[in-house]
Amino acid sequence: MADVIERLRTFTADEYHRMSDAGVFAPDERVELIRGVVREMSPKGRRHVQAVTLANSLFTPALKGFAIVQIQDPLVLRTLASEPEPDLCVLSSSNPRDAGSESIEALLVLEVADSSLRFDREDKATLYAEAGIGDYWIVNLVDDVVEVYREPLDGTYDTKLVLVSTESISPLAFPDLDILAADLIP
């Protein structure tokens, strides 16, 4: 008997949008496109919601007029057949009308991780590095630290910093903005 070869059907970003527009996904269904695969997102717990709210309350007022701060919205990485929905993304335009445009750059991507920690460290880190995103932060709720990944090269990050609550860091694009790790961890 011949072996059956199973193949995974992947989707382009345009197909993913058409599926969404056609109502393939329930209105309350949380999915994202990662390398052509429609992936169900982890449910958000109380600490996750708090961490996203903390990050939003820090970045949005500090960067008003300098950048767009996007919360849990798609980040178009069309060449990688991906549209992840990072918990927070700082975009290179200060014009809110540019949100969702492929022509603006992600200056900082931040993910809040508890049950998704492995996926955020491995799959999403590789995806963001391949996309050339120079500043990727994970608010790690498992260990109550902030992991900072920088210097993307060949699908990986050359630099990884782990910040405890008493340490601070600045986004590469905004060196005057000092963020204390404790202010991101609920």
Image: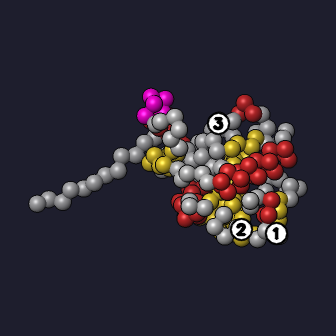
Q: Which residue is denoted by mark 2 in the rendering? A: 145
Crowding around mark 3 (Cα neighbors within 10 Å: few <14, some 14 to 19, many 20+) is some
What amino acid is found at the position of numbered circle 3 in the picture? Gly
Q: Quadrant of residue 141?
A: bottom right
Query: Is residue 184 among what the camera can see?
Result: yes
Q: Quadrant of residue 45?
A: bottom right
Give the residue displayed 69% in from the left and 61% down from the top: 139
Query: Is residue 107 among what the camera can see?
Result: no
Tell which tag, 3 or 1, sits nearer the viewer.
1
Front residue of 169 and 44: 44
Can residue 85 be found in the magenta stretch? no
Give the residue displayed 69% in from the left and 44% down from the top: 71
Tell me if 184 is positioned left or right of 15 in this view: right
Q: Which residue is denoted by mark 1 in the rendering? A: 167
Give whichever of discs 3 and 1 has the lower sequence position: 3
Q: Write the start and end of the magenta stretch as one range.
A: 20-24
What amino acid is found at the position of numbered circle 2 in the picture? Val
Secondary structure of the residue carrying numbered label 1: loop
Give whichever of discs 3 and 2 has the lower sequence position: 3
| Name of the residue lying farthest toward the left | 1
Residue 34 rendering spot, x and y as whole percentages? 50, 50
**Which corner quadrant holds the N terminus?**
bottom left
What amino acid is found at the position of numbered circle 1 in the picture? Glu
